[in-house]
Image (cartoon, grey):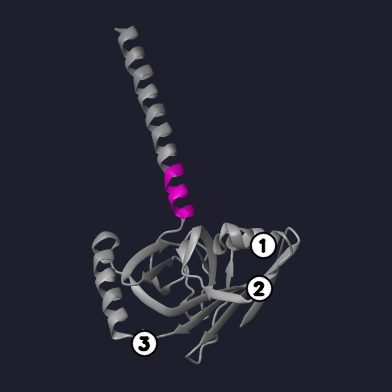
Amino acid sequence: MHESTQISRGEGTVTVIFNTASTTEVSPPAVRAGDYKQLVDSCFTPKELTYIDEGLNAEVSFTFVMSDEIPSSEVSSQFEVAIANIEKEIGKVNEGVYFDARSTKAIGDSDSSVDLLKEPVEFQFDVPLYLRKENREYYVLTNNKGVCTLLNDLDKETDMITIKADSITDCLILYQDNVPKAESTSKFQITSSHLFIVSILILVGMWFFVDRVHSRI
């Protein structure tokens, strides 16, 4: 899957490309940025942004290759250790799919990799159809040179995962089932409020009853 977006900045233009591929029979999901302007600002240095403002065109490309297996035993071991620690905090999690992520930028005649961003940027992953399920909580576990970080899904949608990340690294989609949606919590809170009001009414009724009994004595 290939998506290209052009962002105007000053006199120049930055082309942002998202490529997704799959090593399995399942088609790769789309990956996109939540805010393309913020993404551009975070990928280029202040000096490079000045060149773009003055009319130099640039390009930044992101490639995500989906796989149902982690190709490196070393990376797999790092994820296993991280998942074991995560499960101590939030309970059992399941592994979804793995993404090998890479990014490069080009401005003028020079090009380089993009590993770190100047600030966290929102990325959106479409959830593969076979992983979509109601009351399922998604996470993204990133691996930056052996340092694993768990990122929470920000939008809580069944068909999309939204995260904020400050690096372009390999990642693993994790999920938990039977997690109540926010609406369920709201219903419980309303029910509790009703019970509280009923309790107050009962107490008031008992007070009037006792008061009438005393007044007759």
Query: What secondary structure is found at the residue carrying circle 2?
Result: loop
Residue at 61%, 83% in the rendered image: 1
Give yes or no for residue 186 being in the magenta stretch. yes
Image check: 115 left or right of 148?
Answer: right
The image position of residue 121, as x and y in percent, is 53, 60
Label 1 and label 2: CA atoms lie apart by 9 Å
The image position of residue 50, as x and y in percent, is 65, 58
Image check: 203 left or right of 106?
Answer: left
Residue at 36%, 84% in the rendered image: 70
Q: Residues within 10 Å of mark 2 (few under 14, many from 20)?
A: few
Name the kind of residue labelled 1 in the image.
Answer: Tyr
Residue that mark 2 sits on: 108
- Label disc, if present, on residue 51 of the rendered structure: 1
Q: Residues within 10 Å of mark 3 (few under 14, many from 20)?
A: few
Tag 1 and tag 2, C-beta contact below 8 Å = yes
Image check: 38 left or right of 87?
Answer: right
Query: What secondary structure is found at the residue carrying circle 3?
Result: loop
Quadrant in which the C terminus appears: top left
Name the kind of residue labelled 2 in the image.
Answer: Gly
- Label count reads 3
Q: Residue furthest bottom?
A: 25
Q: Is residue 159 visible?
A: no
The relative height of residue 161 versus residue 69 in the rendered view (above or below) is above
Query: What secondary structure is found at the residue carrying circle 1?
Result: helix
Q: Earlier in the sequence, mark 2 or mark 3?
A: 3
The image position of residue 119, as x and y in percent, is 50, 56
Q: Earlier in the sequence, mark 1 or mark 2?
A: 1
Q: Quadrant of residue 71?
A: bottom left
Residues 38 and 180: in front is: 38
Residue at 70%, 59% in the rendered image: 53
Residue at 34%, 23% in the rendered image: 206
Question: Which segment did they paint magenta?
Answer: 182-190
